[in-house]
Image: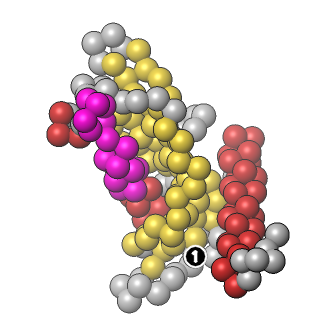
Amino acid sequence: MDSYDEHDEQHKTLHMTVLATPDMANFSGHVHGGVLLRLLDQVAYACASRYAHAYAVTMSVDQVVFREPVNVGELLMFDACVNYTGRTSMEVGCRVIAETVIRGSSRHVMTCYFSMVAVDDDRKPVEVPPVQIRNETEQRRYDAAVLRRDFRKEIERRALEIRQNPTHAG
């Protein structure tokens, strides 16, 4: 994400920092991708729930890109932002930066997009406030989120087509 506003009255951004510890390592000595996904799900949940003032559940995760491995001992900075809102759903964009604490160098290691749905105590969807677009960066994120939503719908339509008639799909 480009810039996060510390004066975020809608609470549409969230920052979380975690130290990568040895218990997170896989057999190659890097942080396990599943651990990163679990942390990302927590960040997306916290961002969406705080924004919606309601419990939020994960509907889907799109474009999970592991750009570089994360080493044990690095500081992981998670930045999340509500990019788009529907009636009851939200897209939360997540970006992960790994910082080598001793050297102070950092790099972008991961990006993904969560579709979250706000629900009440009975797990029924509830409406979320419309996201307010305040600048060009937020407009760009919103427009990209709409394209990703349309792409997801097209994939769902094609997948149903394939399941119903696999020999004639396409």
Residue appearing at x 72%, y 51% in the figure: 144
Q: Residue furthest top?
A: 103
Q: Is residue 158 left or right of residue 7?
A: right
Q: Quadrant of residue 41?
A: bottom left
**In the image, is residue 168 above or below residue 20?**
below
Closer to the camera in the image, 109 or 87: 109
Range covered by the magenta-colored residues: 26-43
Please rate how many residues cluster around mark 1, counting C-alpha atoms within 10 Å: few if below 14, some from 14 to 19, many from 20.
some
Q: Main secondary structure of the magenta part?
A: helix
Question: Of residues 73 and 81, which is closer to you in this image?
Answer: 73
Asked if one can make out residue 42 in the rendered structure from this viewpoint, the answer is yes
At numbered mark 1, what does the secondary structure look like: helix, strand or loop? Answer: loop
Circle 1: residue type: Thr
Residue 120 on the magenta segment: no
Give coordinates of residue 154: x percent, y percent: 75, 68
Quadrant in the picture for the C terminus: bottom right
Front-lying residue, 75 or 126: 75
Residue at x-position 74% and y-position 82%: 165
Q: Which one is nearer the viewer's eye here, 20 or 87?
A: 20
Quadrant of the image containing the N terminus: top right
Q: Which of the 4 image quarters holds residue 135? A: top right
Question: Above or below — where is 4 with respect to 12?
Answer: above
- The residue wearing badge 1 is 88
Q: Residue furthest front?
A: 167
Instruction: Please state if 169 lies on the left or on the right of 79 as rendered.
Output: right
Side (left or right) of 142 relative to 9: right
Give the residue displayed 41% in from the left and 61% down from the top.
45
Q: Position of residue 89 (x, y in %)?
A: 58, 71
Which residue, as the protein is rendered here, is positioned at the far left?
23
Q: Is residue 58 left or right of residue 62?
A: left
